[in-house]
Image: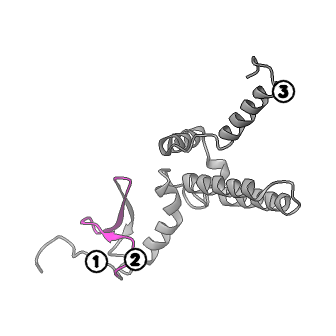
Amino acid sequence: MPNSSTPQKVPKPRPDFPLYCHASNRWAKKIRGKLHYFGKASTDPKGKKALGLWLDQKDELLSGRTPRRAGTTTGPTVEDICNEFFAHKDELRKTGEITERTYEQYLATGKRLAKAFGHKTPVDDLVADDFRHLRAGIAKRGAQRDTNRPRQSALRTRALANDILPESSP
């Protein structure tokens, strides 16, 4: 259609390119049922700028957050805080103050937080609603169970059987 006023769609630069050229001639990606745009394909036919924007916003979009504008916030990110926490807990593990299993549980929780909030999300950007979504996700997966509950229950049963704990204690 050489006489058509509709611009030609730009093909993907390579088969594994994460974005596609929308009919509006913009690089786009559908995330959580909503289209997100990453710049005009006519001015960026190779998609380099669009890919850079996608990579900057990827964590926030995939976790359901509205992406922040680049350079609007400074300070530590979720990744920074988690890494500091893990370094401290690793020292405690090495000195025997916490067990390997406890350390692994801390790591799993940190990964869950980073996935839910986005690794590069500034801690200052977190709001109460982010934690409500995190809690809802945990409950949905059934991970709200306390991993110590069976051990606590077994210890309580044993203590009651040996008259160490009075019947009326919680």
How would you rate the neighbour count of disc 2 (Cα within 10 Å): few for under 14, some for 14-19, many for 20 or more?
many
Check residue 47 in the rendering and tell me which mark sits there, or answer none. Answer: 2
Segment tinted magenta in the rendering? 15-33
Check residue 164 in the rendering and tell me which mark sits there, or answer none. Answer: 3
Q: Where the N terminus falls, by quadrant?
A: bottom left
The quarter of the picture where residue 96 lies is: bottom right
How would you rate the neighbour count of disc 1 (Cα within 10 Å): few for under 14, some for 14-19, many for 20 or more?
many
Instruction: Judge from the rendering whether residue 43 lies leftward or rightward of residue 166; answer left or right.
Output: left
How would you rate the neighbour count of disc 3 (Cα within 10 Å): few for under 14, some for 14-19, many for 20 or more?
few
**Which x, y percent locates residue 139?**
52, 40
Distance between the alpha carbons at the discs numbered 2 and 3: 70 Å
Give the residue at the far front of this rendering. 162
Instruction: Judge from the rendering whether residue 95 lies leftward or rightward of residue 33; answer left or right.
Output: right
Tag 1–tag 2 contact (CB < 8 Å): yes
In the image, which is nearer the foreground, mark 3 or mark 1?
3
Q: Is residue 155 above or below residue 54?
A: above
Residues 100 and 69: in front is 100
| Residue at the (52%, 56%) spot, across then down | 60
Q: Earlier in the sequence, mark 1 or mark 2?
A: 1
Check residue 10 in the rendering and tell me which mark sits there, or answer none. Answer: 1
The kind of residue tagged 3 is Ile
